Amino acid sequence: MRISIIGIEDERFNRQMQLIANLFFEESEIIMAEQSDADVQIKFTLQVKNLIAVSAELKDQNGEVHVANYQKELNGSLMEKEQFKQIKHAVAHVYLTVLQDWTGMIQKWGILTGVRPTKLLHRKVQQGIPLKEAHQQLKEDYLISDEKIELMQHIVDRQLAVVPDLYSLKKEVSIYIGIPFCPTKCAYCTFPAYAINGRQGSVNSFLGGLHYEMRKVGAWLKEKGVKITTVYYGGGTPTSITAEEMDMLYEEMYTSFPDVENIREITVEAGRPDTITPEKLEVLKKWNIDRISINPQSYTQETLKAIGRHHTVTETIEKYHMARKMGMNNINMDLIIGLPGEGLEEFTHSLMESKKLMPESLTVHTLSFKRASEMTKNKEKYKVAPRQEVEKMMELAEKWTKDHGYVPYYLYRQKNILGNLENVGYSFPNQESIYNIMIMEEQQTIIGLGCGAASKFIDPVSGKITHFANPKDPKSYNDNFEAYTQDKLDILDELFSEKNSPA
């Protein structure tokens, strides 16, 4: 779909125009100029004084015309950058509206293209805006549907029930520990994940660097008296390493980190069932870790083969029962909507198999075509369900989880996600992952340790976010982990200095 945009010349609009077009069309090209052979032409008129007034007229090659208008008062007291955000917002409003009118396709998330929509509602709660008014603002300002606003409210309520002090945890931190190895790399994956076979030298070097980071950061936390809220071992697959290596890693955690016994939650992803062994479960039990993920993604064997997961459906079920028998009391399982070759029938089957296990939490992802993934590079090889069927699968997931006692407690969205939908974490009440809440709502600093681990430093006064990422490949990490560790400690020193301490 080639879209010609007239009347908007500022390049700062270009990315927004492309992102919103991507909500409607799988392949779209935005031309910020008049183009006679474009499939559709949209002419904008923009006036900015005390009022922002925007109109858009859409004409397609059949001569069909659609018009949309929007007005909003301009807050003149804001800085120029913030005023421009208001203008972009108004342009997005009419752009989305006119495309919805033309295509007949309603975007339930409105103009939102970001990852964390629930942050908008949290912000309004923190500002003391009554819920009815907050909902109306979300509907009018962002064109979010009542259905999605209701979902956001359920999630915000649940998060505040699970973490009542969510808004006052800026003086604490959470820790993410990245293990960049997997048995194989899945076709949809862009996480730092390297096939572990034949890489033992890289593994050994990497673990040496990770232990160093844990010691240095732990010493800083102890010195400054900073508490840890949660620890999350992700990757890759943290259970790809040996039981002995896991044992030494958790021993390092208990030795280096402050007050480990009082950390609210420690989670280890054991996402690939083919990495789970009795010996590794014994290690988890030894260090009082009972919250893990075992991720089937699908209960259809042909699908697992197509996406590059080498475990079997039977193995997933067997490893789940083994983990349960050996004391894992809070198990999460992931399912993905829209995997290649799967439709409503296959997803229904996955839910029925989930019913036989009933894990404490079930995270329902919608497939996203991530730019660097094998699946995106070879789209013709991976045929996925149409938008309408994907939406039906999401509706089925919502109904099934509700009928079986699960509640939604976090969500996030991704670019190029099928059906412009979302990923939702469901759990039994009081079994929610606190780490997932912290990473999504960005209420505290999360320190990333290990290969590919991203740190998110949040200023405890202003809320400003600073991102810092360790390198994704083990060699670069192994060559420079000391420098990256010091860089993080320097940022922490500034963030947690006395002059920057919240009241």
Image (spheres, grey):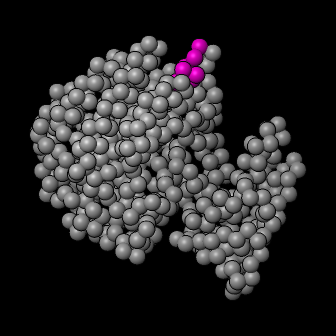
Q: Position of residue 227 (x, y in %)?
A: 42, 19
Residue at the image position 36 percent from the left and 53 percent from the top: 364
Residue bounds of the magenta highlight:
492-498
Q: Is residue 145 above or below residue 229?
A: below
Magenta region, main secondary structure: helix
Report the label total: 0
Q: Quadrant of the N terminus?
A: bottom right
137 and 412: which one is in front? 412
Q: Position of residue 30 (x, y in %)?
A: 66, 69
Above or below for 293 versus 174: below
Task: Measuring from the top left, give residue 242's x and y in whole percent.
Answer: 18, 39
- Residue 119 appears in view: yes
Q: Eyeballing the image, is 55 above or below 256? A: below
Name which quarter of the figure residue 203 lies in: top left
58 falls in the magenta region: no
Examine the rendering and report whether any part of residue 357 can be seen: no
Left or right, 89 with respect to 310, comes to right
In the picture as drawn, the residue positioned furthest to the bottom comes out as 62
Q: Residue at x 44, y 18 (%)?
A: 220
